Amino acid sequence: MTAFDESAELSLMLGKLGVRAGGVLMVHASLGGSGLRATDVRDALLDALGPGGTLVVPAFTQENSRTSRAHRARTVGMTELERERFRASMPAFDPGGTPCTAMGMLAECVRTSPGAVRSAHPQTSMAGLGPRAAELLDGHDPHCLLGERSPLARLYEARAQVLLLRVGFEVCTAFHLAEYRTTPPRPERTYHCVVGERGNWVSYEDTALDDSDFAALGGRLPEELVVRGRLAGKEVALVEMRPAVDFVCEQMSGYRH
């Protein structure tokens, strides 16, 4: 199947899944091996949303950390002195210039598209295109990764949909919002990142996030909340964010302590 055929199939699928014209859509995607170009996927998503719709993607820079999996992968095998030198040389996060390549081709494509807006968190920024992008992504508190003072809370209020395009629920960022809302509240931990200038490390306290059970939680979602399809050999799922987050919050509150 050609890239053109795959793009046409995607466009048809978005309509069948129920992507809302004029709505807000957050997308996680893995395009490797699909034959799809990131620009074609972006355009198909924007076409499905229409001129009144807004597309949002995670534009995370998790390597801007001392403890993330991404940072550990970059420093594996280094001596402590080498790690310290590496950290001292790390550039600060720049919303307009820092790439988000670890989030996939679509995220980087959206981030670099003309007119794109990006939130300012140095580790968990989001990028968007469309008339509501600035409203939804502005004011991302640098001490709040994915909670009430982040774009996730605004996406929840906007009744966004979440599209998992050839990825599973293990990467469903929306579930992190539920972690901030569990009863009892989750513990906090210290996060570190570089801001302002090269090697300028700062720290802050925020909820200790844990995505290790996201795949299982996604599997427990009521069927009426998820519409499924397949594209280029892998599953696609469209989820209503608000009821999904509410369900996951209730589930987490029942067993996470």
Image (cartoon, rainbow, N blue to C red):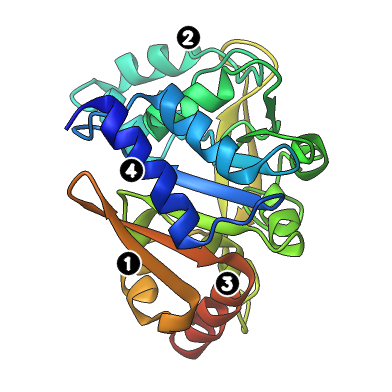
Name which residue lies at 32% across and 60% down.
229
Which label number is shown at residue 215?
A: 1
Q: Is residue 61 visible?
A: no
Q: Nearer the viewer, mark 4 or mark 2?
A: 4
Along the line of sight, which residue is nearer the eye, 106 or 97? 106
- Classify residue 167 as left or right of residue 135: left
Tell me the quarter of the image containing the N terminus: top left
**What percent of the width, then of the height, locates residue 100?**
47, 26
Give the mark nearest the N terminus, 2 or 3. Answer: 2
Q: What SS does tag 2 mark?
A: loop
Q: Is residue 169 depicted above or below 197 in this figure?
A: below
Instruction: Kindly identify which residue carries mark 2.
Output: 89
Q: Is residue 25 visible?
A: yes
Q: What SS does tag 3 mark?
A: helix
**What percent of the width, then of the height, locates residue 209?**
50, 59
**What percent of the width, then of the height, locates residue 23?**
69, 53
Badge 1 vs badge 2, beta-carbon distance below 8 Å? no
The amino acid sitting under disc 2 is Ser
Task: Rate crowding at label 1 as few (under 14), some (14 to 19) or many (20 or more) other CA atoms within 10 Å.
Answer: some
Give the mark nearest the N terminus, 4 or 3. Answer: 4
Instruction: Kindly identify which residue carries mark 4.
Output: 9
Which label number is shown at residue 245?
A: 3
Give the mark nearest the N terminus, 4 or 2. Answer: 4
